[in-house]
Amino acid sequence: MYAIKVDNLTKKFNDVVAVDHISFIVDAGELFGLLGPNGAGKTTVINMLSTLLKPTSGYGAVVGFDISKSKDDVRCSIGVVFQEPALDIKLTGRENLEFHAMMYGLGKEERRKRIKEVLELVELTEKESVLVEKYSGGMKRRLEIARGLIHKPKVLFLDEPTLGLDTQTRRHIWNYIKKLNKEGEVTIILTSHYMEEADFLCDRVAIMDNGKFVASDSPEKLKDILGGDVVSMEIEGDPESLMGQLKSLEWIETSTKHGEVLSLTMEKGERRIPQLINAAQKNGVNVTCVHLRKPSLEDVFLHFTGRTIREQEASQSERNRAMIRARMGRRR
């Protein structure tokens, strides 16, 4: 049974296409990731599925409810943790949860029970009477997750849930998300531009670029596309002749030039490094550094788009400004 079904979903802001005819299905109980740089369209997808934005065209359904025709049913079935904080910092943790539960129409006894359960889940019971303004960033994020679960949603949307948190706190949040999904049996849709986050958490991911899906599968299968090991060589000199020779070698799966770094995928990379250095020297290229590792989702993104996440974010800054201008023009 599916929790979410999307068919050719599209969102335009005047002439700017933010989401471009995407289609996918998320099974009930799945932890599905939407990955890509800022501005790729991830949050726009979440906003359409949570009925905050009306699609320009296409179809979307959450637990069987059409996102355009049955908005109230969709909203009662989902929880959302937004990218931007949405807590009242002048209230305590418990008061934030109490207010949210009342908004969903939970009775007094049910509110008391659910608040106790979600506070225990995110380990904030001892801090329930503390004003939120005194919470750390990680505590606030955990409280927002608790708030999103207060009404027992079937689907939880997490939009960049660890953005701005330190590495240790991010790891703790990851563990809470895993626990929610596996023990709480909540279907989770997660957006992120942290590839290692998606690799750790997600059963399946879709990598977005310029509003489209460029790849979709489990993290392991996506990394298997590249095959074997990744050998990165920092070089000095003209690499053109070297690249031509490398592409002719049968044991090299893929080759990408990225600035002064050549990224090559192959089996048994540690045994091939001497051959690579020898080939570089014969082509008048000096190798200053060599690094061997297993493929990552960042490598997958580079493979499908030819650019890193950081480069895509930089190149899309102007696109984001164009979208803002388009929105402003529509409101006039």
Image: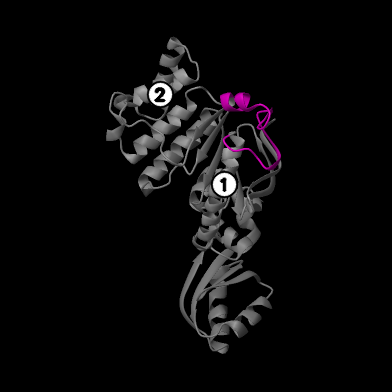
Q: Give the residue displayed 37% in from the left and 29% down from the top.
A: 123
Q: Say if residue 210 shows up in the picture.
A: yes
Residue at the spot x=59%, y=38% of the render?
53
Please tell me whether residue 72 belongs to the stretch shown in magenta: yes
Vertical placement of residue 192 versus 279, above or below = above
Asked whether 287 or 278 is in front, the reply is 287
Task: Quickly name the residue at label 2.
Answer: 97
Q: Tag on residue 42?
A: 1
Give the colour scheme of this rendering.
Answer: one colour
> Could you tell me which residue is drawn at 51 percent across and 38 percent down?
158
> Dividing the image into 4 quarters, which one contains the N terminus?
top right
**Which residue lies at the image location 50% right of the left edge and 22% below the top edge?**
151
Q: Nearer the viewer, residue 232 or 267?
A: 232
* Residue 58 among magenta residues: yes
Q: Amino acid at mark 2?
A: Leu
In terms of image quadrants, where is residue 55?
top right
Residue 284: percent from left, percent from top:
54, 89
Tell me residue 96's x, y (percent): 38, 25
Nearer-N-terminus badge (2/1): 1
Secondary structure at numbered mark 1: helix
Report the Cα–Cα distance between label 2 and label 1.
Answer: 27 Å
Q: Position of residue 17 (x, y in %)?
A: 64, 52
Q: Which stretch did the figure color magenta?
A: 52-76
Between residues 197 and 212, which one lies in front from this camera angle? 212
